Image (cartoon, rainbow, N blue to C red):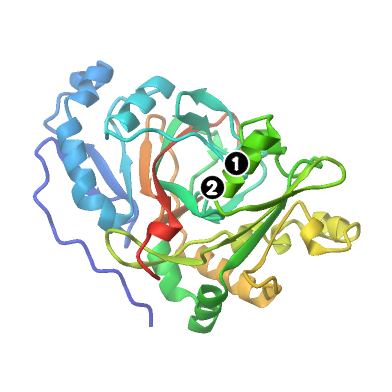
Amino acid sequence: MDQRLPTLSPLAQPDALTVRPLLPGSDLPLLVTPADGVPAAALNGGEDGWRALLPAIHAVVRERLPRAGGLLFRGFGLHGDAPFRAFAESFGRTLLDYDFGSTPRSAVDKGVYTSTEYPAHQSIPLHNEQAYTLQWPRTIWFHCVTAAATGGATPIADSRLVYQRIDPDIRARFAAKRLMYVRNYGNGLDLPWQRAFNTDDPAEVERFCRANAIAWEWTNDGELRTRQICQAIARHPDTAEMVWFNQAHLFHVSNLPPAVRESLLAVVDDLSELPRHVFYGDGSPIEDAALDHIRAVLDGCTRAFPWQEGDVMMLDNMLAAHGREPFSGARKVVVAMADPVRSPDLPAA
């Protein structure tokens, strides 16, 4: 039987806001909207409208985000990259650059990036941002500038619930062995190292790798290969709850479409030569059955909702995983990140 998360007890909310579950049977995400008594004109007037509600918004974030894991702000008149950046910066956190990235993104403003630029017909599996390394953003915001004609949701899942539902034997094996992520940059499949590290200088790459416990080598063709041993589970620094926190199911070659997987495996002698792959931390292979089980658990924990233009979703990146559904038509969702966390600084898991 699952260990269910405790139901949030009713809290007295600031009079200016209404807070309620968006989806039946789940507090992820909680929907935050202006209360009925707040004049619409105040919100339609642009930045000053939502700024007037910031004390109430910040109070709700402090009280509710650590329990719910995610909040969806709707109806605040937020539209566009600049207002979104101002909203994210209002929490007093320095917005992070997308360093050591694993997917293509483009900067649209200082500290604001496009969401992953994968083709519209592809889905993006659930994942916690940058859980494939030893440092990641604690907070992540998504802003819907343009909603897709169909599809394009950003599904989410509670990482505490995922941890609870994974088979204890698999969970213990991942916790004990940890994970080794291997990347071969460039070659038309993974990002070029220049884009992943935001530099053209190999010395800067090596400096970053030394500072982040990443083993590296320059291959004979001038490309870069990295290996990093990382956590599979983590303990949340504030709530002390255990979370499933890795990207093994996403980095593993079994995540690729069958035709792509077979063509890659036909041309490499060693799995470490794949554009990206993941092993247990001791270098041994991860069982396909374990990854199939993990993917099934993630699917069972997934919650999704359609975007509305102007929405801002704020996630605790350790408490909530996110992904992307395929879509058609124009879609623009931008992202900001803050609050860097280092695995060595967390309580022991």
- Up-down: is 1 above or below 56? below
Quarter placement of the N terminus: bottom left
Q: Amino acid at mark 2?
A: Ala
Which residue sits at x=53%, y=34%? Answer: 148
In the figure, is residue 100 to the left or right of 306? Answer: right
- Which residue in the rendered view is the most extreme toward the top? 45
Question: Splitting the image into 4 quarters, where does residue 236 fall?
Answer: bottom left
Quarter placement of the C terminus: bottom left
**Which x, y percent locates residue 34?**
20, 34
**Which x, y percent locates residue 213?**
57, 54
Task: Report the residue marked by disc 1.
Answer: 207
**Which x, y percent locates residue 240?**
30, 66
Question: Splitting the image into 4 quarters, where does residue 158 fall?
Answer: bottom left
Q: Residues within 10 Å of mark 1 (few under 14, many from 20)?
A: few
**Separation (CA) of disc 2 from disc 1:** 6 Å
Which residue sits at x=45%, y=29%? Answer: 111
Residue 35 in sight in this render? no
Query: Mark 1 and mark 2 in contact (Cβ < 8 Å)?
Result: yes
* Numbered disc 2: secondary structure: helix
Residue 3 in sight in this render? yes
Which residue sits at x=87%, y=42%? Answer: 221
Marking on residue 318: none
Q: Amino acid at mark 1?
A: Arg
Which residue sits at x=37%, y=34%? Answer: 311
Q: Residues within 10 Å of mark 2 (few under 14, many from 20)?
A: few
Task: Report the residue marked by disc 2.
Answer: 211
